[in-house]
Amino acid sequence: MRDQADKLREMALNLKNQIEAEIGKDNKKQTRVIVVSSGKGGVGKSTLALNLSLSLSILGKNVILLDADLGMANIDIMLGLVPQYNLYHIIKGNKTLKDIIVNGPAGLRIIPGGSGLDELANLNDEELNRILVEMGKLDGECDFMIVDTGAGISNNVIRFLLAADDVIILTTPEPTSLTDAYGTVKSIARNGFNGSVFLVVNRVSKETEGVLVAQKFKLVGEKFLDLDIKILGHILHDPQVESGIRRQEAFIQAYPNSIAAKNIMYLAEKLIDEDNADNVVKPLPVKKGGIRGFFKKVTSYKQP
Ligand SMILES: Nc1ncnc2c1ncn2[C@@H]1O[C@H](COP(=O)(O)OP(=O)(O)O)[C@@H](O)[C@H]1O
Ligand SMILES: [Mg+2]
């Protein structure tokens, strides 16, 4: 007679095969997953994640924004949206992807991470399966998934960074922000991250400041971390960014002619160029992990 342990083993094996079959099928087109991080809080991560996602949408890309920041001005508040459900409800099997997705402007779709974010570290097989199957539905449908993270390099943030295809590190020209951004880059480099690291300098007072700060950061990365940091660009300090927030509208739409909006549109264009170039160098299916791959890594991250 088979004992309980045998049955459990068999169940686990079936589940594993089911997950792998789901992951393996359809690797026609993978979503590029880009995680936005900084180190220090309040440098403009959520502002960038939202407005960059919108710019990519406006430029004709299919974009999903995952709100993995439980901070103050998170994405829903910035847009005046009231999400009812979040990743937690998918994990627990109460809701499907369709139920939790929030429709934003310009065709942008937003996934609220909410209380589900804490759960991602400790899923059982069934919960893992739900996340991979539900989120995986977006693979092949979206060009980009942008992930906004909270401040710091807690395990929860590192987990997302290491699972990304690429990361965008955001800093301001302030020394404390630069030090924290460097710390973040260092810790992902030490953990073997092999995607692209893009740098964006926010709240610069003039163009030359943006260029200089970025160049310096890049040199330090090369010298001390042996890392090729790609400069994506900079965003000028622009009071219209704050006005947009007060109107609960993304400034890229509220003030499309503002200097910061033009800066971000330029970053989006560069990312698209980069993605196109990358598709030539690294043809599918090897180049990206896609959304399934991303969640697989996020959930299996083990604290060193
Ligand atoms: N380029 C900018 N010019 C002016 N204000 C900005 C700029 N970028 C961000 N801000 C403001 O900085 C504050 C913090 O931004 P936020 O995106 O919430 O930061 P984070 O997500 O990193 O904590 C917000 O009030 C936002 O309006
Ligand atoms: Mg934020």
Image (tube, rainbow, N blue to C red):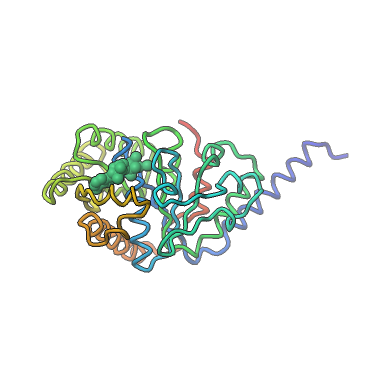
Image quarter in which the C terminus is found: top left
Work out whether 166 lies above or below 151: below
Give the residue drawn at x 45%, y 39%. 70
Give the residue drawn at x 45%, y 57%. 64
Q: Is residue 111 left or right of residue 16?
A: left
User: Across the whole image, how many numbered discs are drawn on residues?
Assistant: 0
Asked if residue 129 shows in the view, the reply is yes
The furthest residue to the front: 247
Quadrant observed for ligand 2 in the rendered image: top left
Q: Is residue 6 left or right of residue 155?
A: right
Give the residue drawn at x 41%, y 61%. 105
Q: Estimate the x, y position of residue 146 in percent, counting from the top left.
A: 40, 53
The furthest residue to the bottom: 60
Give the residue drawn at x 58%, y 55%. 97
Work out whether 291 lies above or below 140: above
The furthest residue to the left: 208
Work out whether 135 lies above or below 176: below
Q: Quadrant of residue 42?
A: top left
Q: Estimate the x, y position of residue 289 in percent, counting from the top left.
A: 46, 54
Q: Is residue 109 left or right of residue 255?
A: right
Asked if residue 202 shows in the view, the reply is no
Q: Quadrant of residue 32?
A: bottom left
Front in this rendered view, residue 234 or 13: 234
Image quarter in which the N terminus is found: top right
Q: Estimate the x, y position of residue 231 in percent, counting from the top left.
A: 23, 51
